[in-house]
């Protein structure tokens, strides 16, 4: 009897999501028709399919764990000009380790191009990790991420790290930062096409992990709870042509307590976000900002946080 009731509740939950999914699919289809009649949209579609084919070929290579190789930049004469400029201008930025986390049913091979471009620009430690394909719980994946972060910090001797997450990887990183105190050691979280508000496409899959990625799930509701004093900044990249996050706006991060910067794109598919040149340039240049600019950014953030913690009934003047 209990099994029958449980099955009935699952069917009812799926049925309840059908109208919303149908609406989102209709909107996505309308946008797709407008997009794919434009040259930029057609190029984006071609790149998505080409990268899918390349990624399938690279997938077996990505199953092998990557070894962390710290690079000490003591001499710059042997470095190419782009890498040398970052090392000389901001050695702290060049030395902060970057951890890359893939999405659902994927592995580190999705970051093949992205990792190469970060290293080429002078970032010394770029480490792409794999978590288990059998992961059925986002919270467990966040605990696993905690272990990766601590091992990377121990290996490199760095106090802080940056995390870049594609798709589900971005939500895992966000959970670690918001709910597990990861903001103490994570300077920046970059999310590429991550379902911060869920995706209605997840309603089509009956797995436990996909249920957590549906709009309004318990895990996603946790992430909407207050996060006062969160010290991590978020760089969010999303695309209006994302075919996995439905509706696409659910890749945007809206939270009053979080420090968020955003890059919106019109013509990039979900899988292609880590190889898009605009994505790579924006993320790399933002992570490589000089210490003086970063300190000013932190001062603005701290003023905002102090204003949000004032007693109710008092309103602070907006920061200039």
Image (spheres, rainbow, N blue to C red):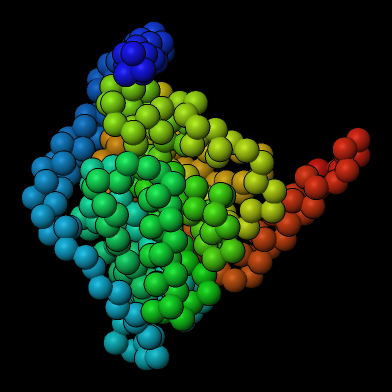
Front residue of 69/268: it is: 69
Residue 34 visible in the shown view: no
State left or right for residue 309 relative to residue 196.
right
Question: Which residue is pictured at 26% across the width and 52% down the height?
Answer: 132
Where residue 282 appears, x then y in whole percent? 43, 53
Q: Residue placed at 54% from the left, 59% from the top?
A: 182
Quarter of the rendering containing residue 316: top right
Which residue shows up at 39% across the image and 79% down it? 155
- Quarter of the image where one finds residue 12: top left
**Please, which residue is most extreme toward the left here?**
57
Residue drawn at 21 percent across, 65 percent down: 65
Q: Work out whether residue 200 or residue 57 is closer to the camera in this orientation and state it.
A: 200
- Give the x, y percent position of residue 212: 41, 33
- The answer to whether any part of residue 202 appears in the image is yes
Q: Quadrant of the N terminus?
A: top left
Q: Picture coordinates of residue 158 (x, y %)?
A: 48, 77
Q: Residue 229 location in percent, x, y?
A: 69, 53
**Splitting the image into 4 quarters, where does residue 111 fall?**
bottom left
* For residue 273, above or below residue 67: above
Q: Image check: 53 left or right of 186?
A: left
């Amino acid at each position: 009897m209990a099994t029958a009731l449980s099955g009935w509740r699952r069917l009812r939950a799926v049925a309840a999501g059908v109208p919303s999914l149908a609406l989102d699919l209709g909107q996505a289809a309308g946008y797709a028709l407008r997009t794919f009649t434009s040259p930029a949209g057609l190029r984006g579609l071609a790149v998505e399919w080409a990268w899918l084919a390349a990624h399938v070929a690279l997938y077996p290579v990505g199953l092998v764990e990557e070894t962390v190789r710290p690079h000490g930049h003591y001499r710059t004469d042997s470095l190419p000009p782009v890498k040398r400029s970052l090392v000389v201008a901001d050695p702290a930025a060049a030395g902060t380790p970057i951890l890359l986390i893939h999405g659902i049913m994927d592995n580190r091979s999705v970051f093949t191009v992205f990792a190469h471009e970060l290293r080429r620009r002078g970032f010394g430690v770029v480490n792409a990790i794999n978590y288990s394909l059998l992961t059925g719980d986002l919270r467990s994946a966040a605990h696993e991420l905690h272990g990766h972060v601590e091992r990377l910090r121990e290996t490199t001797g760095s106090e802080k790290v940056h995390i870049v997450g594609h798709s589900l990887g971005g939500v895992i990183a966000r959970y670690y930062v918001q709910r597990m105190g990861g903001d103490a050691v994570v300077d920046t979280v970059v999310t590429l096409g991550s379902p911060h508000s869920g995706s209605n496409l997840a309603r089509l899959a009956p797995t436990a992990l996909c249920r957590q990625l549906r709009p309004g799930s318990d895990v996603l509701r946790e992430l909407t709870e207050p996060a006062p004093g969160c010290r991590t900044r978020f760089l969010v990249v999303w695309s209006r042509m994302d075919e996995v996050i439905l509706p696409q706006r659910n890749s945007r991060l809206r939270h009053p307590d979080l420090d968020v910067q955003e890059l919106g794109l019109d013509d990039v598919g979900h899988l292609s976000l880590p190889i898009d040149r605009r994505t790579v340039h924006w993320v790399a240049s933002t992570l490589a900002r000089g210490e003086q600019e970063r300190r000013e950014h932190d001062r603005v953030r701290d003023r905002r946080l102090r204003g949000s913690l004032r007693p109710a009934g008092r309103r602070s003047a907006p920061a200039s």
